[in-house]
Image (tube, rainbow, N blue to C red):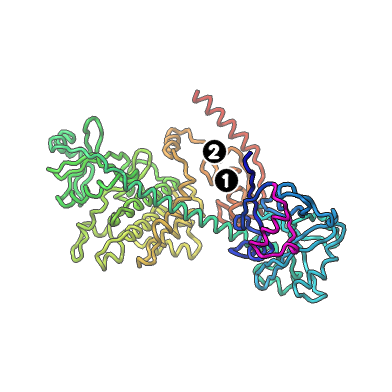
Amino acid sequence: MPIRRISIKVARDEDLRSYIGRDGQYFDLVDFDKVRAFSVLVDLPIRHLKENLKEVFGTDVQFQRLWLFCGRQNGTCRPFRALCEDKQSVLNPSTPRNLSREDLLVFLKLYDPEKTQLRYIGMLFVKASSRPSEILPKLRNLAGFRADEEIMLYEEIQFKPPLQCEAIDIYNTFSGGQIEHGDIICYQKSPSYSLSQHAYPSVLTFFEHVHCVKDAHKKIHALEQKIVVSKCQLEELQDQNAQIILEFSFVNLQQATEDFKDVCKVGDTEYGRVYKGTIHNTTVAIKMCRSKSLFQQEVYVVRQGRHPNIVTLIGICAEASALVYEWLPMGNLEDHIVCSTDSPPLSWRIRTQIIGEVCCALLFLHSHKPSALVHGDLRPCNILIDANYRSKLCNFGTSTLFLQPGTCPPNLATRLPYMDPEFLTTGELTPLSDVYSLGVIILRLLTGMPPIAIAKKVSEALESDSLHLLIDKFAGDWPYIQAKQLALLGLSCVEMRRDKRPDLLTKVWTVIEPLTEKLPIASWRYIQSASRGSYPPAHFICPILKEIMNDPLMASDGFTYEAEAIRRWLDDGNLRSPMTNLALPNCNLIPNRALRSSIQEHLQQQRQSDS
C-alpha cells in the first residue's frame, strides 16, 4: 500500500503581524499563499508535528497552541477548532478538553485615523455569553488608551462588494451579535470632531478606501496586460508574410481605364492622378504616381504587411510607376465631415469608430521594426471610407518627399493645421508627429469645424463649460461624457511640444479602446434601415446605447433609458444625466411599462411585415 501524505500550511502569530498592512493587505488574518507548506504523513501524531515545527520555527512544544483553519463563504480562512495531541493524527485531530463551547477565540486589530493605519494587536479568548463591554478595559490597555477613552468596535465580515464591516453592539452578548471562532474585531477611538477631519475617520471608511485602491490596482494590472497583448498582436501583424502583389503591364491599366479617360479620373493630387478602373471583373483604384521615388517609397511601406485599416495594395505597374489599390466607394473622410457628398452626415458612433480605426492603423505603422513607419501626412483627405463605413489610411509615408526644409510643399495651407509644429523647425518626423495629426482629426470629428485654430476653440469651450455647444449637431446626441473624453484627448495630442504629447499605445489607445468596444459591429445596417424609412421612432431608442430598448427605465432626469445601460452608468459613479449633464436629483429608476408595451407592439409589427 502506498504511503499517504497530505500538504498542510502553517501560519504563525508572527505571520499575522507581518501580513496585515503589507502591500495594502488589511482585510483577513494571513495570506495563505505565502506561508510555509509541509508534506506530512496522514497518520503523523500531532505531538510529532509539533516537534517538527519546533525544528523549523524554534518554538518549544509546550508553547505551541495549534488551531485548525477552514474556509468561509466570504473567501477568507479563519480558525474554527483548537487541536489536541491526545494520540490524534493530523488528519483526525480532537478538540482540547480545557476549551468549552463558551470559549471563543477572536482576533484584534487597532485602527488609527491620524496615521491611517490598521495593525494587528493580538488574539483574545472571550465567553460567548459575555458582552463586548466587558473586554473594553483590556482593549484600552492593549492600545495604550486612557481608562476613560471611548472606543468603537467593528466586525470584519466581507471585503468584496457589497463591503461589510459592521459596528458591534457592546451591550449585546458575543453570541447574540453572532461572533464566533476566528472572527476579527477592529476597534478605534470613538470618532470625534477632530477625527472627522481626517481622510478616513472610521474603520469602515478606511476599508472602503482600501477597496477602491485595490480595485484601481486591478484595473491598472488588467490594462498593463492588455497593453502587453496589444504589443504582441502588433508584432504578430508585422511578422506576417508580405502580401502577394500582382504585376500589371501598362496595357492592363489602359484597358482598365479605357485609355485613362477623364470620366474615369476620380482624383488629382500631389501624389498622383487616381483613376477608377476594372481589372479581372474587379473595381480598383489606379494611382499614377508623380515620380519614381514616390512610387518606390509607397511600395516599400505597403509591402511591410497588411492591416484592416490600411488600404490594400493589389498590384503595381513598375514601368508606369502605378499602384493598383482596392476600390473604396465612399470617398474620403474630409468629404464626409464637410458633407460635400450626397451621403448623410456621419453619426457620433461611426466617428468614434473611425477614431479607433485610425489609431489602430498608426499603432501598426509605429510598431514596425527596426524603425517606426510614420505616416507624416495624416489628414481626413488621406483617410478613405469603405462601403461599411470602415476607414483605411492611404498616401502614408510619402510626405518627406514634399516637406523638405527650405522648400515650399504643395497645398501647404491645407496641410499646415495637421502638421507637427516641431517638424516645421527641425525637419524631423517621429511617431509623435502622427499623434499631433490624430489630435486635430479627433477634434474635427467631434465638432465638425475647420481645422484652423480648432484646438483653441475647444479649449475655451471646456474652460467655459460650453463644450456641448461646440459638438457637431449633425452627429446626433453624442454622450457628453464620451465627447468630453475625446475633447481632452484631442487637446493633449496637439500639444506644441512633442514631449508633452501622450504615447499612442499607453495613453491614447487606453482612452479610445473602451469607447469603441461599446459600438455595434454592423453600423452600416442601421444606416440602411434609416434610408429605407424603417427606423424605429426616436423615443424607442436608448439615448446611451442608441438601440431599441428592451427594458426601458425612467431616470430622475425625466429621460428613459435601457435598464442595463442606465444602471451601468450609475454604477460607474456618474451622478449627472447622460442627456443634460445636470446633476441627477436622485438615483431612482422607474419602469416605463407603457413605452415597453409600445416597443413590443412595434417589433411585432416589424416581424410580421418582414415575413
Spot occupied by residue 337 in the image (x, y as percentages of width and height):
36, 49
Q: Amino acid at mark 1?
A: Ala
User: Of the numbered discs in the image, which one, if any, rests on residue 426?
Assistant: none
Q: Is residue 208 magenta?
A: no
- Name the residue tied to disc 2: 548
Spot occupied by residue 167 in the image (x, y as percentages of width and height):
77, 60
Between 609 and 40, the one nearer to me in the picture? 40
Disc 1 crowd, CA 10 A, few/some/many (<14, 14-19, 20+)? some
- Under circle 1, the secondary element is helix
Q: Using the numbered discs, state the Cα–Cα distance from disc 1 to disc 2 in whole angstroms.
A: 12 Å
Between 528 and 155, the one nearer to me in the picture? 155
- Name the residue tied to disc 1: 565
Whether tag 1 and tag 2 are in contact, CB under 8 A, the answer is no
Quick check: 328 above or below 586? above
Number of numbered markers: 2
Q: Residue furthest front?
A: 1
Q: Is residue 426 left or right of residue 498?
A: left
Q: Is residue 177 visible?
A: yes
Highlighted range, magenta: 43-67
Taking the spot 44% from the left edge, 58% from the top edge, the residue there is 487
